Amino acid sequence: MSLPPSPTRYQHFIGGTSTDGHSSDRIERASPGHGVVVSTYPAGTEADALAAIATARTAFDQGPWPRTTGAERQAILQRTAQLIRDQRDDLGLIECLESGKPIAQARDEMDWAAGIWDYAAALCRHLHGETTNTLGDGMLGLTLREPAGVCGLITPWNFPLLIVSQKLPFALAAGCTCVVKPSEFTSGTTLRLARLLKEAGMPDGVCNVVTGTGDPVGQALAESPDVDLVSFTGSTAVGRKVAAAAGRTLKKVALELGGKNPQIIFADADLDAVVDAVVHGVYFNMGECCNSGSRILVEESVADALVARVAEASATVPVGDPLDERVKIGAIINDAQQAKILDAIASARRDGAEVRLGGAPLASGAGRFVQTTILDRVTPDMAVARDEIFGPVLTVLRFRTEAEALEIANGTLYGLSASVWSRDLDRALRMTRALKAGTVWVNTFLDGAPELPFGGTKQSGLGRELGPQAVLEYTETKTATIRLGPYTPKWL
Ligand code: NAD
């Protein structure tokens, strides 16, 4: 794999055609691993967003898609899954170059995404309401599930195709039409996906993509009275803004936000497995992962031995050129994120944490890399124990009792995921019940399947993606109350 000879020039995708939109301004995206411009996208304006919303509105109110059968929707979603699989190498390369993630991982993510499209395709045939037949002889209740309408889907840069695939196929399965706003750093694969949908037979105007920055493009989606639902994945700070803007028109809101996910390791756990899961959990996707296991809570009696083993394993993980097939930790997305990671390490040093490994940028030509870093002797009051770092940085806290572990684990604003490592199943289940998180793993980490719902509690989000309910998130419920036989006057 090598760098492309020239940047790919992308356009918005509105109403089934590619367009530069209302402005000639463009966003240049340089590969985080090489510092070379690999893509350019239109810097979308409010007018572009409004044009796409109007197109999606017309496609919803007058177009065929909300009126198609489940079987027709299924066929198009399945074909899209296959096209993603067919183009996994191309799509993976785009994501590697735009986001800095390792090429081998990027290709795996394309397969994951295709699997989600397959799963959503299956759900198209299962979308139905309910009947209520217990209202007496004279009454029948029908509960209809209808598509929610025009959906605004706003996504981040860390898993571009995967995250849009946790939203878009379910919205389409429900019969909605969409305007997608990908991250301004990684818009390439979302634009390619819109073209694949067209190739798979999707009617024009159903899936539109507008590139550009959050303000104005994302903001316009959150504010517009013509958008019925906004689904956002990104930081908690921006999620609050999106919810506030959406509140002005009281549209439906789904939010997938940040996390500070604890891995709780008891002394009786299989420590060989723990070492692998800790290293994977914290360094996967350079730590730029909402589910990152960036905070381990270790029972005091095994903490020193475990940290020594994790440090030894961490020092062997290959960091470097994302195009190298052997690399497991690629480049950091942008200068701001690199500075945020280094600031977090500096704040930990000031607060008295012990840097057991790394702690500095990795010297490398034009790329942007951070050493695998372990911060030991972190206490729950330190900023690094509470705030998301989003980098290859592990924080180690210690505990003595189950109650103390639980108090530390639940002691942040977040509640996305957590894991418990213990051979004592009673204890693992007690902890599973008491942890405030949308996902709890027992004796594993980062496992998942399209069948399993995903989302956060507390300030990690609102609503759930994936799982059999995912399609219902994109529906409205309509109650039909039907009088059987003659109406009996009851008021006059
Ligand atoms: P971000 O919040 O900066 O941006 C996310 C998206 O929102 C981008 O497309 C951005 O352009 C857009 N945006 C920015 N300002 C906006 C505004 N005012 N109105 C509407 N849209 C706006 O997040 P990021 O830096 O791209 O991604 C990293 C964050 O995403 C992390 O906090 C991470 O935890 C979170 N994340 C969460 C999940 C999850 O499923 N819970 C998954 C991945 C990432």
Image: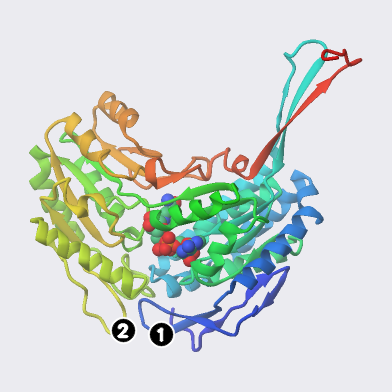
- Residue appearing at x 31%, y 66% in the figure: 329
Q: Earlier in the sequence, mark 1 or mark 2?
A: 1
Please give the label number shown on residue 358: none
> Which quarter of the picture shows residue 297?
top left
Specify whether residue 158 is in view: no
- Residue appearing at x 73%, y 60% in the figure: 202
Q: Which residue is mark 2?
A: 366
In the image, residue 24 lies at what x, y percent? 59, 85
As shown in the figure, which amino acid type bears the numbered disc 1? Val
The residue carrying pointer 1 sits among few (fewer than 14), some (14 to 19) or many (20 or more) residues within 10 Å by Cα, namely: some
Q: As rendered, which of 61 and 312 lies closer to the eye?
A: 61
In the image, residue 434 lies at what x, y percent? 31, 29
Q: Is residue 169 left or right of residue 305?
A: right
- Residue appearing at x 54%, y 49% in the figure: 247
Q: Is residue 466 above or below residue 114?
A: above
Q: Is residue 395 left or right of residue 253?
A: left
Mark 1–mark 2 CB contact (< 8 Å):
yes
Where's ligand 1: which quadrant? bottom left
Q: Single out the residue that lies furthest toward the top.
A: 137
Q: Single out the residue that lies furthest toward the front.
A: 492
In the image, residue 218 lies at what x, y percent? 54, 63
> Which quarter of the picture shows residue 388?
bottom left
Q: Quadrant of the N terminus?
A: bottom left
As shown in the figure, which amino acid type bears the numbered disc 2? Ala
Color theme of the render: rainbow
Please give the label number shown on residue 36: 1
Q: Quadrant of the C terminus?
A: top right
The residue carrying pointer 2 sits among few (fewer than 14), some (14 to 19) or many (20 or more) residues within 10 Å by Cα, namely: few
Q: Is residue 132 above or below residue 443?
A: above
- Residue appearing at x 21%, y 75% in the figure: 362
